[in-house]
């Protein structure tokens, strides 16, 4: 065990802090929106470091960057490791960058120890994971995995105007390779948890077994507009009163269905005039659950609640699910490789289902995949306050290294 190679934690931390200077917001945060000059600069630095580590660089048509370290066995499909370099508008230094730079640190460590793997090791940076400037999160990995078409990716518009395709061209970030043309034997992604579970459990490592499913449900409650000053209380069909009851019922739904998260995340009352009783409310309910049955049950429950509350309040309810992301279960072989690496290195670890979306969730559709989480302070991310301890960063990268080694094989 003591002879097992370890990453250079100081070098990895140094690279993280150096990359964070691109888009530095001065308050500990980072603003590197997808397909901006800052994003391109970060990718250039990243590619330069990968080249220095002896990797060959290729880019595909949506800007995903692959840095390959050759293996001894040409027949074996490469092991893919990495994450993303873009951030939220008020992002931190670790979300994404950690996984990409830890993957690079794995390659640097293999070089230090002159370790030749059987399968090649490929480091990846996926384009537009955040879905902040462009609406489609995980664009790069989505096209790679065939979840999104190239047209859907290139055609989406930035909040500030240009299309994804126009920005790829302007920045010279698109390559000649067809997205998804490459095949990989496995994919591992290290990421901060972005939640409090690993930290509050006193663990260093989260063995991510999959990601929870989600439903976006649109609910329209229709009553009757009327004068607020002349309509007696018992003669009203106030859509907002029904909506208020539904907000409360949705909030209480998880108490009956453990494992479910349910949120009314949008609500608009019409016509929005002081002296008119709201005749119509449009709302969006966001429901999450790690199991397909649990998700379907919670989705059905929202519909049932909307209908019964509407009926009681003399309203009409229309309910429509407009977004469905099924739960994803990661590959057991890859999950086992992460667990074994954490055990080998003696890091306290816990199994966890990812609450957030990640590139790995899309990649898992076509490639055996698992993720590694490390704690972030107080579970905070998408914030300048986002922070991971250097010791945890090092531990996560060591687990990534050993999961990669076990999967790629040592020549
Ligand atoms: Zn991320």
Image (cartoon, helix red, strand yellow):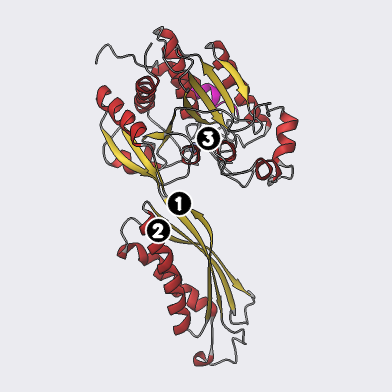
Outermost residue, front side? 75
Q: Earlier in the sequence, mark 2 or mark 3?
A: 3
User: Secondary structure beneath disc 1?
Assistant: loop
Residue 244 is left or right of residue 409, and the answer is right
The residue under the point 62% across, 84% down is 225
User: Secondary structure beneath disc 3?
Assistant: loop
Asked if the residue at tag 3 contacts the one at tag 1, i.e. Cβ–Cβ closer than 8 Å, the answer is: no
Q: Nearer the viewer, residue 209 or 78?
A: 78
- Within-10-Å neighbours for mark 1: few <14, some 14–19, many 20+: some
Q: Earlier in the sequence, mark 2 or mark 1?
A: 2
User: Which residue position holds label 3?
Assistant: 29
User: Which residue position holds label 1?
Assistant: 326
Q: CA distance from mark 2 to mark 1?
A: 8 Å
| Whether residue 133 is situated above or below residue 318 in the rendered picture | above
| Whether residue 8 is situated above or below residue 174 in the rendered picture | above
Quadrant assignment for the N terminus: top left
- Within-10-Å neighbours for mark 2: few <14, some 14–19, many 20+: many
Q: CA distance from mark 2 to mark 3?
A: 35 Å
Q: Nearer the viewer, residue 195 or 304?
A: 304
Q: Nearer the viewer, residue 35 or 271?
A: 35
Q: Nearer the viewer, residue 124 or 377?
A: 124
Q: Is residue 384 visible?
A: no
User: Which residue position holds label 2?
Assistant: 295
User: Secondary structure beneath disc 2?
Assistant: helix
Q: CA distance from mark 1 to mark 3?
A: 32 Å
Asked if the residue at tag 1 contacts the one at tag 2, i.e. Cβ–Cβ closer than 8 Å, the answer is: yes
User: In x, y percent, where is residue 310?
Assistant: 48, 80
User: In x, y percent, where is residue 64?
Assistant: 60, 30
The residue under the point 32% across, 33% down is 205
- Magenta residues, as a range? 16-22
């Amino acid at each position: 065990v003591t002879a097992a190679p370890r990453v250079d934690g100081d070098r990895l931390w140094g690279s993280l802090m150096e990359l964070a200077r691109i888009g530095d917001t001065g308050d500990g945060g980072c603003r590197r929106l997808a397909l901006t000059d800052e994003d391109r600069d970060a990718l250039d630095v990243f590619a330069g470091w990968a080249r220095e580590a002896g990797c060959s660089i290729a880019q595909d048509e949506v800007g995903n960057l692959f840095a390959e370290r050759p293996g001894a066995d040409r027949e074996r499909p490469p092991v893919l490791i990495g994450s993303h370099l873009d951030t939220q508008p008020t992002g931190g230094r670790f979300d994404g960058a950690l996984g990409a730079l830890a993957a690079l640190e794995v390659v640097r460590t293999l070089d230090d120890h002159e370790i030749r793997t059987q399968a090649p090791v490929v480091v990846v940076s996926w384009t537009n994971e955040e879905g902040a400037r462009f609406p489609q999160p995980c664009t790069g990995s989505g096209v790679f995995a065939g979840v999104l078409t190239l047209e859907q990716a290139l055609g989406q518009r930035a909040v500030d105007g240009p299309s994804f395709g126009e920005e790829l061209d302007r920045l010279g970030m698109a390559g000649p390779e067809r997205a998804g043309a490459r095949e990989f034997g496995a994919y591992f992604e290290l990421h901060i948890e972005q939640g409090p579970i690993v930290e509050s459990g006193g663990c260093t490592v989260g063995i991510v077994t999959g990601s929870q499913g989600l439903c976006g449900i649109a609910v329209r409650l229709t009553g009757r507009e009327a004068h607020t000053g002349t309509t007696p209380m018992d003669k009203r069909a106030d859509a907002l009163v029904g909506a208020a009851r539904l907000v409360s019922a949705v909030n209480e739904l998880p108490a009956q269905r453990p494992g479910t998260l349910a949120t009314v995340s949008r609500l608009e009352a019409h016509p929005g005039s002081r002296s008119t009783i709201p005749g119509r409310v449009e709302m969006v309910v966001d429901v999450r659950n790690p199991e397909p049955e649990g998700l379907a049950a919670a989705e059905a429950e929202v519909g049932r609640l909307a209908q019964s509350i509407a009926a009681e309040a003399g309203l009409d309810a229309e309910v429509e699910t407009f977004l469905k992301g099924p739960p994803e279960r990661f590959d057991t072989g890859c999950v086992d490789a992460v667990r074994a690496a954490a055990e080998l290195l003696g890091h306290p670890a816990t199994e966890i289902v990812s609450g957030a979306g990640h590139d790995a969730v899309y990649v898992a559709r076509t490639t055996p995949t698992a993720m590694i989480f490390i704690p972030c302070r107080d579970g905070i991310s998408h914030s300048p306050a986002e922070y991971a301890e250097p010791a945890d960063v090092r531990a996560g990268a060591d687990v990534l290294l050993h999961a990669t080694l076990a999967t790629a094989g040592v020549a």
